Amino acid sequence: MSDSRLAKDHGLRLDSVDDAMVLIASGVRRCVFTLDDLGDHFFDLRNQVAGTVFQKLINYRCEVAIVVPRNHQLGERITELAREHRSHPVVRFFSSIEDAQRW
């Protein structure tokens, strides 16, 4: 298995709740996801995918860093979500891959 913590290096994506279970089953305990590794509708808060995925990751203690650049176009609610998860023990948001990997 690769020493990389980047989701793409493990062939991992988060498009759905099922993908969270694939991540958990993969044995990768710490992983960094960029926006390219997330489904187009992952942050559509109406479909509850992000919240359900986050709860699965929390339940299984699978640590995930999500990189959302400061200049993202995802809206204020995602900015607020990222702020709330700055110091979360399992799901954290970072503005750069380097900061996410250091965590």
Image (cartoon, helix red, strand yellow):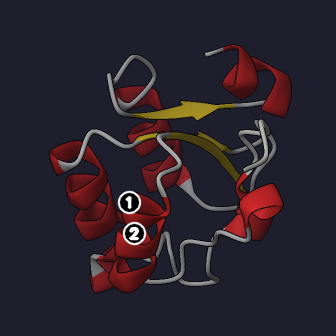
Across and down, in percent, residue 18 comes to 36, 84
Q: Could you tell me which residue is drawn at 69 percent across and 45 percent down?
A: 68
Say left or right for 13 vs 80.
right
Residue, disc 2: 20
**SS for callout 2:** helix
Across and down, in percent, residue 25 comes to 39, 65
Q: Exactly how many numbered labels are in the figure?
A: 2
Which quadrant holds the C terminus? top right
Identify the residue at the far front of this view: 1
- Structural distance between the alpha carbons of marks 2 and 1: 6 Å
Say left or right for 34 vs 9.
left
Q: Which mark is residue 24?
A: 1
Q: Could you tell me which residue is drawn at 43 percent across and 53 percent down?
A: 77
Q: Vertical placement of 12 versus 89: above or below?
A: below
Q: Nearer the viewer, residue 99 or 43?
A: 99
Identify the residue at the far left of this view: 59
Query: How many other residues sit within 10 Å of disc 1, few (<14), some (14-19) or many (≥20)?
Result: some
Q: Nearer the viewer, residue 76 or 36?
A: 36
Q: Vertical placement of 15 versus 98: above or below?
A: below
State if disc 1 and disc 2 touch (CB < 8 Å): yes
Q: Vertical placement of 51 versus 67: above or below?
A: below
Say left or right for 70 vs 25.
right
Q: Vertical placement of 70 versus 87: above or below?
A: below
Across and down, in percent, residue 70 comes to 76, 36
**SS for callout 1:** helix
Across and down, in percent, residue 54 comes to 31, 55
Say left or right for 52 vs 2.
left
Residue type, numbered disc 1: Ile
Residue type, numbered disc 2: Ala
Q: Could you tell me which residue is drawn at 79 percent across and 67 percent down?
A: 36
